[in-house]
Image (spheres, rainbow, N blue to C red):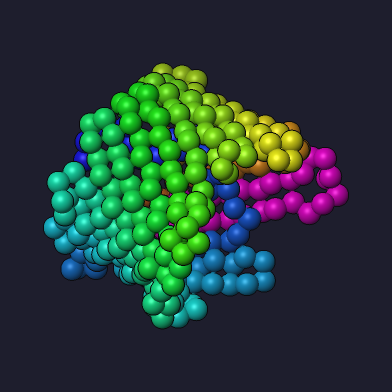
Amino acid sequence: MSKGPGLYSDIGKKARDLLTKDYSSDQKLTVSSYSTTGVALTSTAVKKGGLSTGDVAALYKYKNTLIDVKLDTASIISTTLTFTDLFPSTKTIASFKLPDYSSGKLEVQYFHDHATITSVATLKQTPTIDVSATVGTPNIAIGGDAGYDTTSGRFTKYNVGLSFTRPDSSASIIFGDKGDSINASYFHHLDQFKKSVAVAEITRRFSTNQNTITVGGSFAIDPLTQVKARLNNRGMLGALLQHEIFPKSVLTISGEVDTKALDKKSKFGLAIALKP
């Protein structure tokens, strides 16, 4: 793929990931292994509240094709086929679930040195089409995405975003929810070794006249241990610790507390990912 401006979904992604990724209030165990034929097998068990679920997934790569099949405890089979360079400078992703035959989705991504375009079509009884595009460079990009319902003839969404990226920082502004919200975020490495990161995000929703301000960061204590924290203006404080207990195997402990209502029950999450 080319080194262009990236996908529209990449705008603000670094800040979003630092503030949301790996924060959980569930108990999760993931075990991965590889067969002699090159198939990657992953078993996952999740306990959320009083409900327990699980799934088994198989991932196989053949030339430029990636085949991902997953079976969960609800007897739903999810299949994703990813074709790289099926056409020049493109990635094609086809996905569907069984027995829900109307869940099919086809996505085509086109990459250029100064632009990317993504088109997604669903195969439901009321088909929808999503299109997103970005133009620019790896340092400066502007883009937008829109969703169209072919049955009603109406747009289901339209958003516009702008991003600035440097080796040690990135900033983005996104006008979303059909113009009802604006989100601005800033991500910055605090040292040359990129062990410490700070992030700030401001979201304003015009229809409710509400602002949400969130600050957070991460710090690598050592090559095997990382801590993260976040706090918003509503008093929600979250923190997590990740430790590589074995090579490629990670333990994640996370929690969240409402600092303005300490009598409320705090959230606690535990995740273990074991890989060979």
Q: Give the residue displayed 50% in from the left and 51% down from the top.
A: 155
Q: Position of residue 82 (x, y in %)?
A: 26, 58
Above or below, 114 against 153 in this view is: above
- Quarter placement of the N terminus: top left
Residue 253, placed above or below residue 12 = below
Determine the image quadrant of residue 25. Answer: bottom right
Tell me if residue 192 comes above or below residue 69 in the rendering: above
Asked if residue 49 is positioned above or below residue 228 in the image, the reply reads below
- What's the residue at 55%, 40% (across, down)? 176
Looking at the image, residue 70 sits to the left or right of residue 74; the answer is left
- Total numbered labels: 0
Q: Is residue 93 visible?
A: yes
Residue at the (36%, 40%) spot, across then down: 133
Q: Quadrant of the C terminus?
A: bottom left
Residue 260 magenta-highlighted: yes
Residue 192 lies, in percent from the top left, at 41, 18
Is residue 33 shown to the viewer in this render? Answer: no
What stretch of residues is rendered in magenta? 249-276
Q: Position of residue 42 (x, y in %)?
A: 37, 65
Residue at the (30%, 39%) spot, across then down: 116
Q: Nearer the viewer, residue 19 or 42?
A: 19
In the rendered structure, the answer to whether residue 89 lies left or right of residue 184 reads left
Is 108 positioned to the left or the right of 48 in the image?
Answer: left
Main SS class of the magenta portion in the image: strand
Residue 251: say if magenta: yes
Where is residue 68, by image quadrant?
Answer: bottom left
